[in-house]
Structures are given as structure tokens and as C-alpha cells.
Image: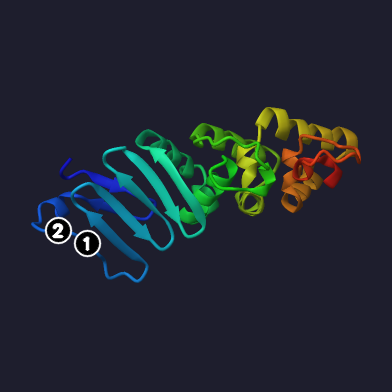
Amino acid sequence: MLGKSFATPLLTFNSASCFSSPGCDSVSTTANTLVGYVNCLSSITFNVTRGSWTSNYPSKKWTLHSTATDNIVLTEEEKKTWNDSRQALSALKFSPEEEDKILGKAFGHIHSPYWYEERKKEVPRLEVVNEILDYLRSLSLTDDDLTKLVKKFPEVLGCSLEDEMKTNVEILAKQWGIEGKTLRNLLIRNPKVLGYNVDCKGDCVAKCTRCWARF
């Protein structure tokens, strides 16, 4: 495993420089925001003030740590899938930490009151995230619009495209005549309408964040 590079959202470290040095216990940078701690015998841990990945050799699990997110434990394959999904958000100019927080909330890894307890944890996939962003672009939303929308409602990336988003856009058009520029303005102002999937009609079913009664 000598010479293998371990990639994090904010750091790539070559382990050969550590394992070739006798008595290596730690490596640190002088940067104000970054310190990498290396245990050369059993694991590698990177602590970054904005976010980091931790790897433990025996389990080959990766844990994403961030000051703004909960710990997210992933396998090596899941970590690659996660990082691939982050590429879909690159055009929206979020920071690496913001990208991880958005994906974490959308796919159940970070607690969000929006989901209550119903959102199962999933590893976000590039094609799923791209499909949703492409659909939103088809509604005349620019990348600047998407940045505002996703920042306000990151859970949109975890909504069902067919059963919720497209269905709700049809409802807005047919029942309220909301489409085109009016729809674009509505989605920027109230993007949660894309995820509505219940209408209590005044008889509350305790799913208020996803209920058409809020519209």
C-alpha cells in the first residue's frame, strides 16, 4: 500500500512520504485551516476545519467529518460514487463542504426535518443528481437560479423525479395555471412545492413539510 494516495474533498496525501520516514507519528502543515494527523501503523485520519475523510485500514470504511455535517460512513466504492455525484454540483459553485452537506441532507445521511423519519440513507449517484438538475434546467432555471434553489432546498435532489417533481409541476399547470416564467419564479421562492406528496385538506396527517396545505 506504499505510495497510495488518499483523496479527500480538500486534500490529497501521499502515504509513501510518511511510511518511509522512521518514527513517523504525524505530519502537519503550517496552513491556518489544515492539519493532517497520520497514524502510520493502522489508519489515516485527516482533520480539516471545513471537512475531511477518515480511513481505517481494517474495515476499509471512510468517514466524512465536517463542522457543518454529521459523520457519514462509506465504503471505498461508496466514497467514489459520492465524489462522482459532487461533480454534478460543480457548475453551481458550492464549496466542497456545501456539496457534502447538500448531498447528505438530500439522501438521508444528515438529519433534515423535511423528511421526518421516512428518508432511507442512500449513496447519491451522479446520474440521479444530473437527471434532477437537467429537469430543473428544462423549466427555464439557470445555474444561478439552481444555486439559490438547491441552497434553500437541498432535499430536492432526493425527491422522486417522476412521482413527485414532474407530477407536481403538472398539478401547478393544470390546477393553478402556473407555468413558464411564473413557475420559475415560484420555484425560486418556494422550491419545496416540488416535493409535496400529500394533501391533508385540513385534516392534518403530521407531514406538514410535504403537504399541499402549505401552498
Task: Name which residue lies at 59% across and 43% down.
Answer: 106
Q: What residue is pinned by disc 2?
A: 24
Where 166 falls versus 73 (above or below)?
above
Q: Pick whichever, 129 or 136, lies toward us.
A: 129
Q: Position of residue 177 (x, y in %)?
A: 88, 38
Q: Position of residue 137 (x, y in %)?
A: 64, 41
Task: Name which residue lies at 22% across and 54% down.
Answer: 39
Q: Residues within 10 Å of mark 2 (few under 14, many from 20)?
A: some
Task: Name which residue lies at 83% across and 33% down.
Answer: 171
Q: Pointer 1 and pointer 2: residues touching (CB < 8 Å)?
A: yes
Q: Quadrant of the N terminus?
A: top left
Residue 138 visible to the viewer:
yes
User: Residue 96: which disc?
Assistant: none
Q: Pick whichever, 147 or 70, lies toward us.
A: 70
Q: What residue is pinned by disc 1?
A: 27
Q: Residues within 10 Å of mark 1 (few under 14, many from 20)?
A: few
Report which quarter residue 170 is drawn in. Answer: top right
Amino acid carrying label 1: it is Val
Instruction: Indicate the secondary structure of the residue bearing disc 2.
Output: loop
Report the residue that reaches farthest toward the top. 162
Task: Name which residue lies at 51% across and 37% down.
Answer: 124
| Drawn side of residue 50 relative to residue 191, left or right | left
Depth check, mark 1 against mark 2: the one in front is 2
Q: Pick whichever, 150 or 56, lies toward us.
A: 56
